């Protein structure tokens, strides 16, 4: 299991290196896209994410424009994060693919989530949905117990513990922050490490 720190600038990304295994560059949250060569300054594994609006991001361009951005950065990244409903062209980028599903309103039924996981095209499938009840926790736990290479947790402060639960149940990545959360319920990386050290 690897600790991922989500960042919104090159300064944050470079500073995050000391605390994590993987740096996520949320390029849609950057003030401007950095030169591709800048990524070489990050001596850790890198996830490049250009999240579109509607999926919790700020990118407002077309899918063709987004694909071009990702193509530019893919050769300097270890992973690209792509939404599960993106076109096939995104899944042929030259690095590992984190295929993601976000739902900021609710957690769909276990059967719907299971269908998404079983239809995956990426290397890792990531599910981040809004938590409302214990039934939602059960759906996430069941997925983590039944499938490999799945990251699954519930968003919201009340359900922040599901990020720890996900790591304990075999999730390959735990998404954290090192200053300011980029998603509701995201834990600070050192805090997450301490909790997991006490539990494992």
Image (cartoon, helix red, strand yellow):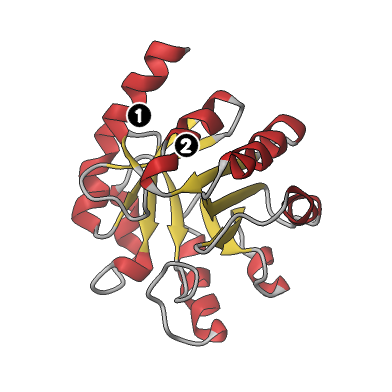
Query: What's the residue at 69%, 75% (across, down)?
Result: 87
The residue that label 1 is drawn on is: 192
Above or below for 118 versus 74: above
| CB atoms of marks 2 and 1 within 8 Å | yes
Residue 8 occupies quadrant: bottom left
Disc 2/disc 1 C-alpha distance (Å): 9 Å
* 3 horizontally vs 92: left or right: left
The residue that label 2 is drawn on is: 163
Residue 88 appearing in the image: yes
Residue 190 occupies quadrant: top left
Instruction: Give the percent coordinates (x, y) of residue 39.
Output: 34, 56
Above or below for 6 versus 193: below
Query: What's the residue at 23%, 47% (across, down)?
Result: 14
Instruction: Give the percent coordinates (x, y) of residue 25.
Output: 37, 56
Disc number for residue 36:
none
Please rate how many residues cluster around mark 1, counting C-alpha atoms within 10 Å: few if below 14, some from 14 to 19, many from 20.
Answer: many
Residue 92 occupies quadrant: bottom right
Query: What's the residue at 54%, 54% (across, down)?
Result: 129
Q: Nearer the viewer, residue 180 or 37?
A: 180
Query: What's the residue at 35%, 50% (across, down)?
Result: 6
The local secondary structure at tag 2 comes to helix
Please rate how many residues cluster around mark 2, counting C-alpha atoms within 10 Å: few if below 14, some from 14 to 19, many from 20.
Answer: many
The local secondary structure at tag 1 comes to helix
Instruction: Give the percent coordinates (x, y) of residue 139.
Output: 68, 42
Instruction: Give the percent coordinates (x, y) of residue 44.
Output: 38, 40
* 124 horizontally vs 182: left or right: right
* 191 horizontally vs 162: left or right: left
Above or below for 87 versus 21: below
First in sequence: mark 2 vs mark 1:
2
């Amino acid at each position: 299991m690897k600790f991922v720190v989500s960042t919104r600038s090159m300064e944050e990304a470079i500073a995050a290196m000391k605390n994590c295994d993987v740096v996520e560059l949320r390029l849609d949250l950057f003030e401007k896209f950095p030169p591709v060569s800048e990524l070489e300054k990050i001596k850790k594994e890198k996830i490049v994410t250009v999240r579109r609006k509607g999926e919790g991001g700020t990118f407002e361009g077309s899918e063709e424009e987004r694909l071009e951005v990702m193509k530019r950065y893919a050769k300097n990244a270890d992973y690209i994060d792509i939404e599960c409903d993106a076109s096939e062209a995104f899944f042929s980028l030259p690095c590992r693919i984190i295929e993601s599903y976000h739902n900021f309103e609710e957690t769909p039924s276990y059967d719907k989530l299971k269908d998404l996981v079983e239809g995956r095209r990426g290397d890792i499938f990531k599910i981040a949905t809004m938590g409302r009840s214990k039934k939602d926790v059960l759906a996430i736990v069941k997925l983590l117990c039944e499938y490999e290479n799945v990251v699954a947790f519930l968003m919201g402060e009340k359900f922040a513990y599901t990020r720890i639960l996900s790591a304990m149940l075999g999730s390959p990545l735990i998404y954290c922050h090192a200053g300011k959360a980029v998603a509701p319920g995201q834990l600070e990386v050192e805090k997450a490490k301490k909790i997991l050290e006490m539990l494992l």
